[in-house]
Image (spheres, grey):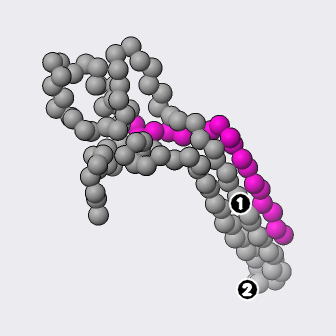
Amino acid sequence: AWSGEVSYRPNAPVQLNTTDILFAGLDPVSIGGNRPYDNASVLNGQAGQDLHGYRRKEITQLQTTLTHFFAQVMGAERLTLVGEIGWTHVGGLESTAKARYGRDPVFGPGPPPGTISG
């Protein structure tokens, strides 16, 4: 048997890097312009501003599954073989110097903007 699906979400929320959101929220409370964490976030927070933790993007997904049954295999009534493949495309992503997406904070904030990591 063969099955699959294609989905398109023209306005899906995509999570920004949570560490960037945290540091952007600390920007307005810097005392006297002293930012000990300067250049830690690619996002800029301002006092009184709503800063959403997501950006809306177009997401296209493609998925297909193949299933095949084999009768009477090695003493069993049936052997089921299943294979699946999927593809996801997120349209309109900015460079990592402008926005970073989806990094789990347990791995840290990632390299500071404008640096090269190997």
Q: Position of residue 11 (x, y in %)?
A: 65, 37
Kindly report the secondary structure that dominates the magenta region of the rendered protein. strand
Instruction: Name the mark on residue 74.
Output: 2
Q: Residues within 10 Å of mark 1 (few under 14, many from 20)?
A: some
Q: Nearer the viewer, residue 13 or 73?
A: 13
As drawn, 60 above or below 77: above
Residue type for callout 2? Met
Find the residue positioned furthest to the top. Answer: 48
12 inside magenta stretch: yes
Image point (37%, 46%), residue name? 97
Q: Quadrant of residue 88?
A: bottom right
Q: Position of residue 86 (x, y in %)?
A: 65, 62
Task: Give the residue pinned by disc 1.
Answer: 63
In the picture, which quadrant includes the N terminus? bottom right
37 sits to left or right of 52: left
Please state which of the two labelled residues, at mark 1 or mark 2, is closer to the viewer: 1
Residue type for callout 1? Gln
Q: Are marks 1 and 2 in contact (CB under 8 Å)?
A: no
As drawn, 76 above or below 58: below
Q: Position of residue 80 (x, y in %)?
A: 75, 73
In the picture, which quadrant includes the C terminus? bottom left
What residue span does the magenta drawing correspond to?
A: 1-18
Q: Residues within 10 Å of mark 2 (few under 14, many from 20)?
A: few
Instruction: Name the mark on residue 14.
Output: none
Q: Nearer the viewer, residue 83 or 97?
A: 97
| CA separation in Å, label 1 and label 2 | 31 Å
92 inside magenta stretch: no
Q: Position of residue 17 (x, y in %)?
A: 41, 40
As drawn, 57 above or below 24: below
Q: Nearer the viewer, residue 17 or 77?
A: 17
